Structure formats: C-alpha cells, structure tokens
Image (cartoon, rainbow, N blue to C red):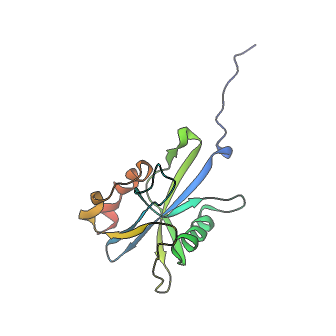
Amino acid sequence: MPPKQHVKDTRSRKVIVAAVIITDGRVLACERSAPVEVAGRWEFPGGKVEPGETDEQALARECAEELGVRVEVGARVGPDVPLAHGRAVLRVFAVRLLEGDVPRALEHTSMRWLAPDELDSVHWLPADKPIVAELPALLL
C-alpha cells in the first residue's frame, strides 16, 4: 500500500484582506489597539473574509467598519503573505476612497498618512512588512 500523502487543503485557510489607501502620495497606516500582543504595532486596515463574501466585498465592509469610509477596491498589491503557520493568508489590495470620504480611527488607536520617506517611521506588523516594501513604487 502506498504511503499516505498529505495534501494541504487551501479551502480551510482563513483569508485576511487589507487595504492600501493612497492619497496625495501618502499611504494610510493604522495603529492596532488590540489584542495586547500587537497593540501599538501598525498595519493596513482590513480583516477576515466571511463565508459567502469575495475578497473585495470583505475589504469594502471592513473599510466601512474600521474607518467609516466607502471604497473602490482595485488591484492586488504584493503576493499572498502566509499567516498563522499557513492556516491563514493575507491579501492586500489598492483601494480608492469614494466621493471625498475621510477615514476615521473607529477601531484603531490612531492613524497616520505616511510619505515614502516615512514608511520606516512606524513599527509595522510582520505580515505587513512585505507589502510596505512594495509601496515606494506606488507612492510616486
């Protein structure tokens, strides 16, 4: 009998989506308030894709919940970033604010608009660092 093969079931992986919101050559960074182990670290806003949602629908919902804004979700930014020892994946998208909406820190401690030379001025969560590396080309 052949040995048992282990096939990774990607359908069971959680998908986390995040938004790269760029305005006037600056990107929005949000400071986490919880949980304790990541409070004070910085991230791109977003959250979990719920059953029945597309990545884009989830990101639009998360931006409304976390920032009080309506958005148009655009192209992917960077590769999938593995999380939780492969049990989850982070997918990041470029996002455009709609009709003059202005983000508010509804679920974060604070927010900052960062220029290209300020990207290293905050302590990013490890999962967001590969995306930060992609930003200089987008912030021109």
Count of marks, rendered view: 0
Most distant residue in the bottom direction: 99
Most distant residue in the front direction: 36
Most distant residue in the left direction: 117
Q: Which residue corresponds to the image point at 34% horizontal and 65% vertical from the top-left?
A: 138
Instruction: Give above or below for 13 relative to 131.
Output: above
Q: Which residue corresponds to the image point at 66% horizontal and 32% vertical from the top-left?
A: 7
Instruction: Give above or below for 61 relative to 47.
Output: below
Q: Is residue 9 left or right of residue 27?
A: right
Q: Position of residue 40 (x, y in %)?
A: 40, 57
Q: Which of 91 and 34 is in front in this view?
A: 34
Quarter of the image with the C terminus is bottom left
Most distant residue in the top direction: 1
Quarter of the image with the N terminus is top right
Q: Where is residue 10 in the image (x, y as percent from the top left)?
A: 64, 43
Q: Position of residue 28 (x, y in %)?
A: 39, 69
Q: Which residue corresponds to the image point at 46% horizontal and 86% vertical from the top-left?
A: 100
Q: Nearer the viewer, residue 61 or 133?
A: 61
Q: Where is residue 58 in the image (x, y as percent from the top left)?
A: 61, 65
Q: In this view, does 113 lie to the left or right of 45?
A: left
Q: In which quarter of the image is residue 21?
A: bottom left
